[in-house]
Amino acid sequence: MELIVSIIGYGNVGKLIAALLLPYKKYSLHINIIDTDSNVRGAVLDFEHGAELYDSHSISFNSQDLLNQSDFIFHCAGASVPRGQSRLVTTKASIEITEAVFSGFRPLKTPFVIVVANPVEVISAITQIITGLPRQKVVGTGTFLDSLRMNHAVKSLMGEATTVDSVLLGEHGSTAFLSRQLSSLNTKSFDVALNQDTINELMEKVKGSASKIKETQEACIYGVSYCAIKVFEALLSVEGRSIPVSTFVPQSLEPVLGTTHAYVSLYAWINTGGVHPIEDYQPNTEELESLKKSLTTISACLPAQYV
C-alpha cells in the first residue's frame, strides 16, 4: 500500500521531516515536496539522491495533483520567528502563507494535516477552516514539544533515572502551563515531588528554550520535527496514544470555554480515527483560568473572517 505524503515548506523542519520519513517501512511512501521558492530545487535533488537507498519510496516536487491526493500533509511553511520575539509576531505573514499554499487545494481524499508552522494553534485553526477538513483531521504539534522540554528540564535537575510525564497545555508560547492533574513525576504528582518555586523555575527554562537554541542555530529544528513524526505514527496506529497537541475545543469543555473556532493545546487521544481531545479532562479552577488565558491570546490573533 502506498501513502501520498505532502510536505509544505522545505526549510530546515521540512527537510528533517522528509529525512525521518525515509526509514519508514510499514508503507511505501510517495513524498511530495511543496515549496514556492525555486532555490530549494537543489536541496530536493540532494534528497532524491539519498532516497535511492530506500527503494520503496518515491519523491515528487511541487505537484498540485499529488497534494490533492495526499493521505497526509505536513504544513511546515511559516514565517521565521525573529530571535528573542514571540511566535505571535509572525501571525499575519504565516496566515498569508497558509492561504496561498491551500488556495488551489481540492482534496480527492480526506487527508490528515499535521501543522508545524508557527504560531501553531493559530495556523492549525486557519488550516482547518480554509481546507474545510473535519476537525479531527487537522492537528498541530502544539505543546507536545513544550512537554518534552519540561521532561528534559526535570531530568536535568533530578537525574536521568527520573520517571517523568509532563503534560503542558494551552499555547505553544508564553501562556503554556503545566497540568498538574495530568502530569506525574516518579508516579507522584508534581506538587508532591517538587515545590512551587522549583516548578516555576523549570517552566521558565521551558519557555526560554527557543531563545537558548537560537543562540547557536537559526531555528528550532529537531524537537518539533520528531514531535510531528510521532503524531504521524499515532495517526497510523489503531492502538493510538495520548499526546498534548493543538486541537479543537471539545463539547465537554464548551460550557466553560465557550464555542470557538480557535484551536488550543489539549491532551488528546490520537489514532487512525483522528484526533480526539480527552473528554474526561475537567480542568480545576487554576487550569481553567490558564486555558482561558491561552484561548484569549490565540483568539485575538484570528482575523475577523475566521472567527
Image (spheres, helix red, strand yellow):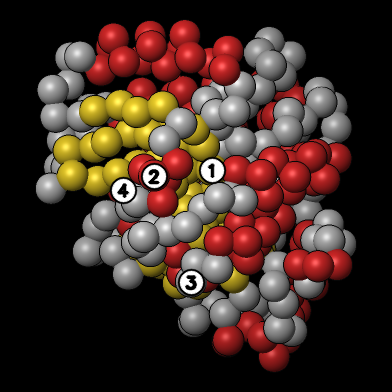
Q: Amino acid at mark 2?
A: Asp
Q: Amino acid at mark 1?
A: His
Query: Do labels 4 and 1 touch, CB within 8 Å?
Result: no
Q: Which residue is mark 3?
A: 134
Give the Cα distance between marks 2 and 4. Answer: 24 Å
Which badge, 4 or 3, is on the more N-terminal residue? 3
Q: Which residue is mark 1?
A: 75
Report the quarter where the C terminus lies.
bottom right
Which residue is pictured at 46% across the width and 31% down the height?
Answer: 62
Give the Cα distance between marks 3 and 1. Answer: 16 Å
In the image, residue 259 sits, relative to residue 216, either above or below, namely below
In the image, residue 74 sits, relative to residue 166, either above or below, namely above
Which badge, 2 or 3, is on the more N-terminal residue? 2
Give the Cα distance between marks 2 and 1. Answer: 17 Å
Foreground mark, 4 or 1?
A: 1
Q: Secondary structure at mark 4?
A: helix
Q: Secondary structure at mark 1?
A: strand
Which badge, 2 or 1, is on the more N-terminal residue? 2
Q: Secondary structure at mark 3?
A: loop
Mark 2 neighbour density, 10 Å: few (under 14) some (14–19) many (20 or more): some
Residue 65 numbered tag: 2
Which residue is pictured at 57% across the width and 80% down the height?
Answer: 250
Tell me where residue 180 appears, x and y as whole percent: 61, 63
